[in-house]
């Protein structure tokens, strides 16, 4: 099944946060989530599901909450391109550091546009111009330097300019003209999965195209299942999940791996067949490997 061009509609951007150790990736994600929870999601209990969605001026943005570029790399290694936009966090008191450069290279080789968040501008030693100049040397040309890369000075600690950052994401997203076909069967990528004592296997997936529904039969990597429940990052139960939506899927027979692709198939027997075939291939690879 492929997207039907006639059914393509705009979808929210999927954003990952990257950057050097301690430059404030987690703080920024937390600050954005907190702001949006306070402003629009009253009553919602925020859970950690590895990804979340916020709204800015009625438009949605999906954040994948991965620990930096390690998960980004793992996903890419599995062939899963999950990210539309990379937020490069650079601390204004520390400027460009080795993992900043690594992050730039990762984003560039994945063809993912960068938005620079110059963080910690509340600190006495903050120097945003120094950051912009340092980025120049790594071929990241921000707007004020005559380039096209959007940059926003923020403070995750004080909550400064988070709106500006979200607006920059929406602007970049518009340029990318992100679209998906919600009328087709769902496909996407597994963000994380674990075995929950009470609920069984729980897979957090990102729906990339199509609509994932309760009762759908899915194959994810070498696991399969029938969707029993769909739960948002706010703990809400859904009947269906639309493109760019991160959602917890209950009903898998086992736990797939982060970065595994998932797709809806037509029958349980088909799902079983695909999963068993992949498990057999994986086992044979394992045997071949241990045989030397
Ligand atoms: P790793 O995941 O370990 O790479 O770190 P990180 O990039 O997620 O950074 P984290 O959010 O853990 O922040 C590192 C430290 O910087 C913490 O002590 C934060 O409180 C502090 N910090 C983060 N953002 C800001 C900011 O805007 N201003 C100030 N003053 N401190 C900040
Ligand atoms: Na840290
Ligand atoms: Mg962190």
Image (cartoon, helix red, strand yellow):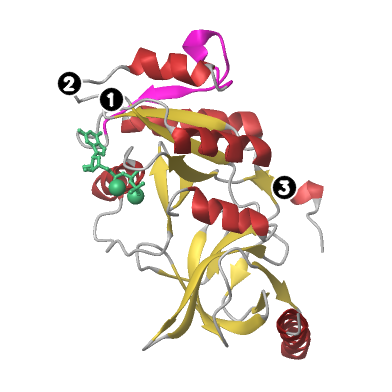
At x 80% / y 53%, what residue is drawn? 4
Q: Is residue 142 magenta?
A: yes
Q: Which residue, as the protein is rendered here, is positioned at the far front? A: 292
Figure disc tally: 3
Q: Which residue is mark 1?
A: 93
> Label for residue 124?
2
Q: Quadrant of the N terminus?
A: bottom right
Predominant secondary structure, magenta span: loop
Point out the tag, 2 or 3, that comes first from the N-terminus.
3
Q: For the residue labelled by badge 3, is the local secondary structure a helix, a strand or a loop?
A: loop
Disc 1 and disc 3 in contact, CB within 8 angstroms: no
Q: Which residue is mark 3?
A: 8
**Mark 1 CB within 8 Å of ligand 1:** yes
- Quadrant of res 219: bottom right
Query: In the image, is 267 to the left or to the right of 18?
Result: right
- Percent across and percent down for residue 280 are 76, 87
Q: Which stretch is magenta?
A: 139-155
């Amino acid at each position: 099944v492929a997207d039907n061009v006639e059914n393509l509609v705009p979808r929210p951007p999927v954003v990952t946060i990257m950057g050097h150790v301690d430059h404030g990736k987690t703080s920024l994600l937390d600050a954005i989530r907190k702001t949006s929870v306070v402003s629009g999601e009253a009553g919602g209990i925020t859970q950690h599901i590895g990804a979340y969605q916020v709204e800015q001026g009625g438009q949605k943005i999906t954040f994948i909450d991965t620990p930096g570029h390690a998960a980004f790399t793992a996903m890419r290694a599995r062939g899963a391109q999950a990210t539309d936009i990379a937020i490069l966090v650079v601390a204004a008191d520390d400027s460009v550091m080795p993992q900043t450069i690594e992050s730039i290279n990762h984003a560039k080789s994945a063809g993912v546009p960068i938005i620079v968040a110059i963080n910690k501008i509340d600190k006495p030693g903050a120097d945003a111009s120094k950051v912009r100049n340092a980025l120049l040397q790594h071929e990241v040309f921000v707007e004020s330097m005559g380039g096209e890369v959007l940059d926003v000075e923020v403070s995750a600690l004080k909550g400064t300019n988070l709106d500006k950052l979200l607006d920059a994401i929406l602007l970049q997203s518009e340029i990318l003209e992100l679209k998906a076909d919600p009328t087709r069967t769902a496909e996407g990528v597994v963000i994380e999965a674990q075995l929950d004592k009470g609920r069984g296997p729980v897979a957090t997936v990102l729906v990339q195209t199509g609509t994932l529904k309760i009762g759908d039969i899915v194959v994810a990597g070498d696991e399969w299942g029938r969707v029993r429940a769909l739960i948002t990052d706010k703990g809400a139960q859904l009947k269906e999940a639309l493109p760019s939506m991160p959602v917890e899927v209950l009903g898998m027979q086992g736990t797939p791996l982060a970065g595994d692709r998932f797709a809806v198939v037509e029958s349980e027997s088909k799902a079983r067949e695909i999963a068993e075939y992949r498990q057999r291939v994986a086992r044979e690879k394992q045997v071949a490997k241990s045989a030397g």
